[in-house]
Image: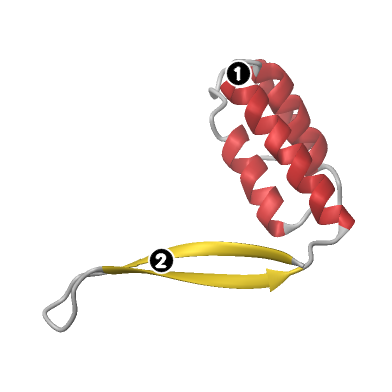
Amino acid sequence: MYLQSIPFILPSSNSFSPSTLTLTMAHEPDNLTRVFESLTATAWKCYFDNEIERAFELARELLMNPRISDYHEARMHMLLSTAKNDSAVYVDMKHTGIY
């Protein structure tokens, strides 16, 4: 079973002091989710390693896949949003209908 912990910070107020609550969700991701998670992580790694063109290429390929989840689609749009408006990558995204 796959366990994921999500920390929540509760705001301070007059009635209670600030504290941290951790919720644990138990779910088993399917193989497709694992593949998309790996590919989106690779795209972001390329981006942070200054392999910008490769990162954008991976993101565009993933966005063309009709089986991509909303979560992974949003992550790739976040990555592509860093492209400058005058770059060839941005023009290509406009041409393919990604933006």
Is residue 67 visible in the rendered image? The answer is: no
Residue 13 pos. (x, y %)? 16, 76
Q: Are marks 2 and 1 in contact (CB under 8 Å)?
A: no
Query: What label sits on residue 58 in the rendered view?
Result: none
Extreme-bottom residue of the structure: 15
- Relative to residue 78, is residue 2 depicted above or below? below
**Disc 2 packing (10 Å; few <14; some 14–19; many ≥20):** few
Instruction: Give whichever of 81, 31 is nearer the camera.
Output: 31
Is residue 98 visible in the rendered image? The answer is: yes
Q: CA distance from mark 2 to mark 1?
A: 30 Å
Instruction: Give whichever of 5, 90 is nearer the camera.
Output: 5
Secondary structure beneath dot 1 equals: loop
Of badges 2 and 1, nearer the viewer stands: 2
Dot 2 corresponds to which residue? 8
Give the residue type at disc 2: Phe
Instruction: Give whichever of 28, 39 is nearer the camera.
Output: 28
Dot 1 corresponds to which residue? 49
Residue 79 pos. (x, y %)? 60, 35
Residue displayed at 67% across by 23% down: 46
Give the residue type at disc 1: Asp
Q: Classify residue 49 as left or right of residue 16.
A: right
**Disc 1 packing (10 Å; few <14; some 14–19; many ≥20):** few
Residue 73 pos. (x, y %)? 70, 49
